[in-house]
Image (cartoon, rainbow, N blue to C red):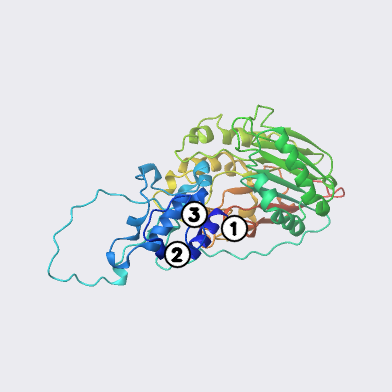
């Protein structure tokens, strides 16, 4: 909490700063009130202190009192969090239009006409995303939920952004999820664990968090070895769900980024996949969508290869329909990862046109404002300005008449980023699944 502590120190220090005689303040200086500037954030301390000390009558804007900063590059004109930049989901923040400064015109003696409210330009706030005329919230359809029965099976997928962070700082969210939904399998994505030791540590923490609620579980890990603190997936499976075999990767191929895990039960298959993002500069767009051997094509064919009913769940990093994009009419949308024409067309070519069923869209065809991702930096969650990037897809042959519920748990992402998505269907020893 460095920022909070800095603000508290300033509030107490500013009262006696007048007695400092305008002397220099360094990291080792103690103010008259006895408080020393926090050495860990000294630049921010000075910046805020100058702001408090500025002369209101000088007419200088407050930014001139702050410490100098480097000029923003054009690549930084779109503000996004590190998470947004890594995932390429900067489309939740409006790009800032820049132009060359114009020469000052000589002041006219005549007073300028008053500007009407309707003539004011639309404001784009770099830090918080687009602010429309009324700042209204994107409305979300209120959907009824199915109450899980004894013969129901629930599968959930959740891009957690860091499993260690979830277990160390937000484990109550996982506990609440287990209590509320009673899932039989939970697939975690973007776990960001780089080695087996980290997986073992989280394995123990996971069991402590969920086994009191779900009973004994088995955990399957597929950590990323290609890059430290990147990607990776994990599956938590209740032992009551039945025996299964687990596989890593697609068709037995190497999976250095740890993106895919398959659970093969006696009567069905569940595939978890964290599909690669095309990137902020779309440098992986071709890998995702181009040619017969692109990632989308391989994953779809893999899911079709089983002779059992198959579910594909995970962060597929594409917003299929227009209703899945809060600002679909914006000109930068076709150029942003997850919403490019190439990604959306690839999704339709390899999935929906081949008989894959988007369980949420199929169950709630009229629903609007139902998203699974919101930019954190743009603070888009309070206004519900998001994308639907996470899915549970039923592969061809899955008995969709067994599906009782398909849902998005937006409450489990109170500040944004990804929330869990899931599906509930009828499946038991008396009623095993059969492929149609």
- Residue shown at the point (53%, 35%) measured from the top left: 288
Please determine whether, in this image, residue 110 is positioned above or below residue 270.
below
From the viewer's perspective, is 259 left or right of 46? Answer: right
Question: Between 359 and 175, which is closer to the camera in this rendering?
Answer: 175
Question: Between 116 and 167, which is closer to the camera in this rendering?
Answer: 167
Q: Circle 3 sits on which residue?
A: 37
To which quarter of the image does residue 351 belong?
Answer: top right
Element under disc 1: loop
Element under disc 3: loop
- Residue shown at the point (61%, 66%) measured from the top left: 142
Q: Position of residue 219 (x, y in %)?
A: 77, 41
Q: Earlier in the sequence, mark 1 or mark 3?
A: 3
To which quarter of the image does residue 299 belong?
Answer: top right
Q: CA distance from mark 3 to mark 2?
A: 12 Å
Q: Circle 2 sits on which residue?
A: 14
Question: Closer to the observer: label 1 or label 3?
Answer: 3
Q: Position of residue 157 (x, y in %)?
A: 67, 48
User: Residue most toward the right?
Assistant: 430
Q: Position of residue 192 (x, y in %)?
A: 63, 39
Q: Earlier in the sequence, mark 3 or mark 2?
A: 2
Q: Earlier in the sequence, mark 1 or mark 2?
A: 2
Q: Circle 1 sits on which residue?
A: 365
User: How many residues crowd mark 3 within 10 Å: few (<14), some (14–19), many (20+)?
Assistant: many
Q: Does any portion of residue 16 appear in the rendered image?
A: yes
Q: CA distance from mark 1 to mark 3?
A: 57 Å
Please determine whether, in this image, residue 260 is positioned above or below residue 388.
above
- Image quadrant holding the N terminus, namely bottom right
Circles 3 and 2, Cβ within 8 Å, touching? The answer is: no
């Amino acid at each position: 909490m460095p920022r909070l502590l800095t603000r508290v120190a300033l509030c107490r220090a500013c009262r006696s700063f007048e007695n400092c005689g305008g002397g220099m303040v360094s990291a080792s200086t103690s103010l008259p009130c006895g408080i020393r500037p926090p050495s860990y954030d000294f630049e921010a301390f000075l910046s805020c202190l100058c702001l408090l000390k500025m002369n209101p009558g000088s007419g200088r804007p407050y930014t001139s009192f702050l410490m100098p900063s480097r000029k923003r590059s054009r690549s930084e004109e779109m503000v996004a969090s590190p998470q947004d930049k890594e995932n390429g989901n900067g489309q939740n923040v409006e790009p800032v239009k820049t132009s060359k400064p114009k020469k000052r015109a000589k002041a006219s003696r005549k007073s300028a006409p008053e500007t009407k409210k309707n003539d004011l330009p639309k404001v784009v706030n770099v830090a918080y995303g687009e602010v429309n005329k009324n700042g209204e919230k994107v409305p979300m359809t209120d959907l009824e939920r199915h109450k899980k029965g004894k013969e129901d099976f629930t599968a959930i997928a959740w891009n957690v952004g860091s499993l260690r962070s979830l277990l160390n700082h937000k484990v109550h969210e996982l506990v609440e999820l287990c209590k509320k939904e009673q899932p039989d399998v939970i697939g975690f994505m973007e776990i960001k664990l780089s080695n087996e030791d980290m997986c073992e540590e989280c394995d123990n923490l996971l069991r402590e968090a969920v086994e009191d609620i779900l009973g004994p579980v088995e955990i399957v890990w597929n950590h990323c070895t290609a890059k430290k603190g990147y990607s990776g997936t994990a599956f938590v499976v209740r032992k009551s769900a039945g025996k299964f075999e687990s596989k890593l990767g697609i068709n037995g191929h190497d999976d250095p980024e740890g993106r895919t895990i398959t659970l093969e039960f006696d009567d069905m298959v569940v595939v978890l996949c964290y599909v690669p993002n095309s990137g902020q500069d779309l440098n992986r767009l071709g890998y995702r969508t181009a040619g017969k051997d692109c990632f989308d094509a391989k994953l779809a064919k893999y899911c079709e290869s089983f002779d059992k009913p198959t579910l594909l769940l995970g962060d597929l990093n594409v917003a299929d329909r227009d209703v899945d994009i809060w600002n679909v009419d914006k000109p930068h949308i076709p150029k942003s990862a997850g919403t490019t024409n190439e990604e959306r067309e690839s999704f339709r070519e390899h999935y929906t046109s081949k008989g894959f069923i988007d369980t949420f869209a199929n169950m709630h065809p009229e629903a609007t404002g139902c998203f699974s991702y919101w930019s954190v930096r743009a603070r888009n969650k309070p206004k519900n300005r998001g994308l639907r990037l996470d899915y549970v897809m039923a592969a061809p042959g899955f008995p969709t008449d067994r599906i009782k519920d398909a849902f998005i748990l937006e409450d489990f992402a109170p500040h944004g980023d990804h929330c869990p998505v899931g599906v509930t269907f009828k499946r038991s020893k008396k009623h095993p699944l059969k492929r149609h």
